[in-house]
Image (cartoon, rainbow, N blue to C red):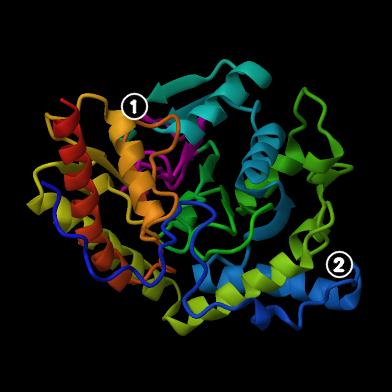
Amino acid sequence: MAMTTPGTRPANPRFSSGPCAKPPAYSVSKLADAPLGRSHRAAVGKERLKAAIEGTREVLGIPADYKIGIVPASDTGAVEMAMWNLLGARKVEMLAWESFGSGWVTDVVKQLKLDADVKTAEYGQIVDLATVDTDNDVVFTWNGTTSGVRVPDGDWIKTDRAGLTICDATSAAFAQDLPWDKLDVTTFSWQKVLGGEAAHGMLILSPRAVDRLESYTPDWPLPKIFRLTKAGKLIDGIFEGATINTPSMLAVEDYLLALDWARSVGGLDGLIGRATANAAVLQDFCARTDWIANLAEDPATASNTSVCLKFTDDRITDGAAFAKAVAKRLEGEGVAFDIGAYRDAPPGLRIWCGGTVETSDIELLLPWLEWAFETEIAALSKAA
């Protein structure tokens, strides 16, 4: 028999893993001063774009000699720009343990046609990082958004490496401690941990990456929207707010507001603390519940942002249908939106725990998860 419907719903049912929840107490009215209808090349536009770049540097603690650029097409655009500009100079190793990392493998092997050393792991696992040679160029995701598995640290990356590390950090930035001295190219998008708006990506280059750009020309042609150099020199304007294409000044203002909120909760340490507390609530729930588990098999590599869960009850014969029914039921109740597992991932749920989510909402979600599970199990029994 299905359990009693819980009496209290989360205040904010937005647990999507991207675009993610806006910061608490967010209001569109706070964007009223955005320089809309103004050129991004005007002084006001350049000032706001530069503020976004330097605010990113401040909150994330990015070294002063690293370049930070705002680029088109979200995190995907930033990763593609890095790979098409930088790869081909050295042997490359591709690491993948979830769908986006697998996408980068496809692009490098089938589009760039490089003879890459591909290392993969199943969902819930991670590759053996001790086998990675960082004297080669290495492309990897820091946090697997679709698998809930993250890199535990940067100890496997040599300080005196000869290769470049190209890191897709889109669901790790602002929630996990990234070792900048070990990362040569880092990318992320605004719509993840800070809940910004889509379509804008961030491309962060170490001095070593800049040296590669200025000393190496790939064999393939680069479309205008990908070009980072001119006459063998870095186009510095890209990293000072002169974007390659027209940005949304409304989205820029929204990101600046999110950075202000990040400062208000203690900056990076505060954001990491909020995400870690949120994920701990779900991990504790899994530990005391016999029908659900974290997809990440090793707690040391379990994400604190995109927490992926799998149902383990033997009565469930069609995992995909069951998980879809649970997610649909919770959305219908206005309790949790968009928490189904990613389409390429194993069946289950994916609950975003980044810093813009309140721990109290995660706690209020738990009895609803139990209710939805028991209700769907009861439906299975009745159908049988």
Magenta span: helix, strand or loop, mainly?
Answer: loop
Instruction: Find out whether residue 307 is within the magenta segment.
Output: no
Q: Is residue 290 left or right of residue 35?
A: left
Residue 165 position in % (x across, y down) = 52, 41
Q: Is residue 324 left or right of residue 363?
A: right
Q: Using the image, tell me which numbered label, if any, was put on residue 121.
A: 1
Where does label 2 land, which residue? 40
Circle 2: residue type: His
Do we see residue 65 in this rendering? yes
Above or below — where is 147 with respect to 5?
above
Q: Picture quarter containing residue 250?
A: bottom right
Earlier along the polypeptide chain: callout 2 or callout 1? Answer: 2
Residue 228 position in % (x across, y down) = 78, 45
Looking at the rendering, the stretch of residues picked out in magenta corresponds to 132-161
Above or below — where is 153 with respect to 131?
below
- The kind of secondary structure element at disc 2 is loop
